[in-house]
Amino acid sequence: MIIDYMRDAVTGRSAELWIYGSLGVGKTHLALFVAEHFDCSYYDCGDIDPEKASELLEWLDIDKGLILDRIDFWLNDMEAESALFSWWKRKRNALVLVSEHSPHVDHQFNLPDLRSRAHASMVLRLEGLNDEGINALFQCHLRRLHIELSSDVLRFLAPRLPRNPSRLMSLVHLIDQESLRDQRKITIPWLKRFLSPQL
């Protein structure tokens, strides 16, 4: 759904998307995927002082899609909100904002005009995944990284997979990195030896 929505945006419709959910449900991983897929600029507001928001946004290309992760760090700062609202009015491509909270939460904004823009966005809540969803995410990430696991290894990992999407994806990356470093096939003994702290 997000890919289709964003595809419409980069082919002429200027989309605004607000993604929210609790820590660890995969918001940042989703944002990074969208950034890579559509060649959007990505910034983590938690790493950027709100006082620098205006300087950053003035420098950005209004014709390129923008993803601002952890936008909460800029909200309720009048200067940062004013800079974001000004850029939002001028932009000609997609804008994705990632937050722990819905834009409809009380006291989320100081600037009423920014609140109105956020409320008019497509708002998507990310929730935790059930067992079927965790397994689907695991399989999808394996395919994306071109990791092939035997049926025995998959059966071994299935009950040990983290239920948190962010931790699950970190585990898959760790499996990939460690196996490449060791130049070894991924086996159950190998996983027990190298991944016991994560499992």
Image: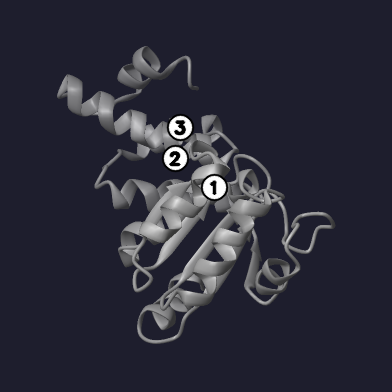
Question: Comparing marks 1 and 3, which lies closer to the viewer?
Answer: 1
Instruction: Give the labeled residue for mark 3.
Output: 157
The answer to which of marks 1 and 3 sits earlier in the sequence is 1
Q: What residue type is labelled 2?
A: Met
Percent coordinates x, y for residue 17 in the rendering: 56, 69
* Residue 8 visible here: yes
Instruction: Give the labeled residue for mark 2.
Output: 169
Q: Which amino acid does label 3 sit on?
A: Leu
- Residue at 57 percent of width and 46 percent of height: 70
Instruction: Give the labeled residue for mark 1.
Output: 26
What's the CA distance linking mark 3 and mark 2?
Answer: 13 Å
* Residue 32 visible here: no
- Residue at 40 percent of width and 38 percent of height: 154
Question: Comparing marks 3 and 2, which lies closer to the viewer?
Answer: 2
Between 20 and 189, the one lying in front of the other is 20
- Residue at 40 percent of width and 50 percent of height: 139
- Residue at 59 percent of width and 38 percent of height: 164
Between 11 and 110, the one lying in front of the other is 110
Q: Kindly indicate the quadrant of the structure image that contains residue 37.
A: bottom left
The answer to which of marks 2 and 1 sits earlier in the sequence is 1
The answer to which of marks 3 and 2 sits earlier in the sequence is 3
Q: Which amino acid does label 1 sit on?
A: Gly
Above or below: residue 57 compared with residue 163: below
What's the CA distance linking mark 1 and mark 3?
Answer: 20 Å
Disc 2 to disc 1: CB gap under 8 Å: yes
Extreme residue in the right direction: 106
Callout 2: helix, strand or loop?
Answer: helix
Above or below: residue 161 compared with residue 87: above
How crowded pointer 2 is (Cα within 10 Å; few <14, some 14-19, many 20+) is rated as many
Between 172 and 188, the one lying in front of the other is 172
Percent coordinates x, y for residue 18 in the rendering: 61, 64
